[in-house]
Image (tube, helix red, strand yellow):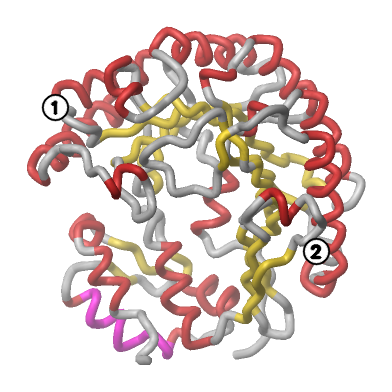
Amino acid sequence: MDELTLPPLSLYVHIPWCVQKCPYCDFNSHGQKGEIPERDYVRHLLADLRQDLQRYRDSIRNRPLSSIFIGGGTPSLFSAEAVRTLLAGIRAQIPFSEEIEITLEANPGTAEAERFRGYINAGVTRLSIGIQSFSDEKLQALGRIHNSAEAKSAVGFAQDLFGQGLKSFNLDLMHGLPNQTVEQALDDLQRAIALNPPHLSWYQLTVEPNTMFAYRPPKLPDDDELWDIFEQGHRLLTAAGYQQYETSAYAKPGFQCRHNLNYWRFGDYLAVGCGAHGKLSFTDGRIVRYSKTKHPKGYLRGEYLYEEKNVPKSDRTFEFFMNRFRLLEPVPKTEFEQFTGLSQNAVKNDIVWAAEQNYLTETDRSWQITEHGKLFLNELLARFLPDD
C-alpha cells in the first residue's frame, strides 16, 4: 500500500518566552529579559507559516485547520492584541473548520481577568492553565512564579468566561513532586476537582536530562507511593465524573482536547515558532517530519526551518502505535492502513504476541490496549521498533 488518506490537520504555534525557567522544564523556553518583541515575533510566525504553506502545498491544499494550540513558554505573556493579529493572519492564509478549537496556554502568574477576556475576543476558544500545585511550598520547589491564591484567581477568571466565548478550559496539575506525600498529592487533586474544570491534565513529574532537577535531583516519592497516588487519584477523578481518555488526560464528557487527540491519533500538524515540530502526510505515500530553529535570535532573523526528514515505512508502525496506545479508545485497523500506508499483515505476528501477553485485545475492526498493557507499555511498543 502506498497511497495515504490524509488525516485531520492542526497547527502548533510556539511562543518561547517565560518569566523564568522552571527547574523541571525541558521545553524550548527562554527566561524573559527586557521587553518581549511580540509584534516582530508575530510577523515572523506568519511569514514562517507562509513558507510552510508553499513548501508543503501538495499536502495542505484544501485542508482546513481543525485546531490550533498556542504553547510555550508562557503564551499569556503576549497581549490580546498580538494574539488577535496572529489568529487573523493565520486565518487569512488557511481556512478554519467551522468548529475549530483554539487553545492558549496561560500561567496564573500572568493572569488578569481582562487579559483572559481579550484572548477570547481575539478568537481563543480554550484556555490551558498551568496550575501544577495548590501548595505554596510545592510551587516554590517547582520554581513557579505564582502562588495558590493566584492559581484559584486565574481559574475564577476562566469560570466567569466559560460559556461566554470560552468553550472549555484545562488545569495542568502535577503529582510526584519533591517530598510530596500521598495525602498532599490527593489534597492537590481534590482542590482541582472542587473547581470543576471541564478538563484536567494530571501527570507525574519526571526528571528530564539537561534540567536543573537533573543536575540537583530532588527527593521524589518512591514507586509504591506513586502507584498509591495514581490509583486513589484515578478513583477520585472517576467519582467526580471525569473520564480518562489518555494516559494523563481526564475530561468531562464532550470536553476532550481535540488538538491533542489529533496528535495521538497520528494526525497531521503544521508547526511554527521556535523549536516547533510538525508532521505532514502526502497522498503519494510520503510522511514528513520537520522542526524549526530553536533560538529566538536565529528565528527572528528569518531562519525558520531547522530540519526536515521523511519517515521511512520501517518506522511508521512504531510511530503510529506509540501515539495511538496513549489513548484508551479502540484503534481502528482501517486507520492504521490509511495513515501509515502499510498492510495489517505487517503487524500480524506482533499483534498475536501482544494479545497472548494480554497487552491488547483484537476484534475484526480494531485493537485496544488493556489495563495490563498500560502497565507494560514500553515493552509493548518495543515490539514494533524497526529491526535495525
Judging from the image, what secondary structure is the residue with disc 1 in? loop
Residue 273: % across, % down = 70, 51
Q: Which residue is mark 2?
A: 52
Amino acid type at image mark 1: Thr
Establish if 262 lies above or below 233. Answer: below
Judging from the image, what secondary structure is the residue with disc 2 in? helix
Q: Main secondary structure of the magenta part?
A: helix
Specify whether 87 is left or right of 29: right
Whether 106 is among the magenta residues is no
Establish if 174 lies above or below 289. Answer: above
Which span is picked out in magenta?
A: 345-355
Residue 181 - label: 1
Residue 303 - label: none
State which quarter of the image contains the C terminus: bottom left
State which quarter of the image contains the N terminus: bottom right
User: What residue lies at 42% left-to-right and 76% top-to-bottom?
Assistant: 318
Residue farthest left in this picture = 224
Residue farthest right in this picture = 92
Specify whether 268 is left or right of 219: right
Report the front residue among 63 and 291: 291
Establish if 146 lies above or below 199. Answer: above
Whether 348 is among the magenta residues is yes
Amino acid type at image mark 2: Asp
Marks 1 & 2, CB-CB < 8 Å contact? no
**Can you tell which quarter of the image residue 131 is in?**
top left
Residue 7: % across, % down = 65, 65
Report the front residue among 127 and 80: 80
**How far apart, in angstroms, are the residues tagged by discs 1 and 2?**
47 Å
Specify whether 130 is left or right of 164: left
User: What residue lies at 88% left-to-right and 42% top-to-bottom?
Assistant: 89
**Can you tell which quarter of the image residue 350 is in?**
bottom left
Establish if 301 lies above or below 243. Answer: below
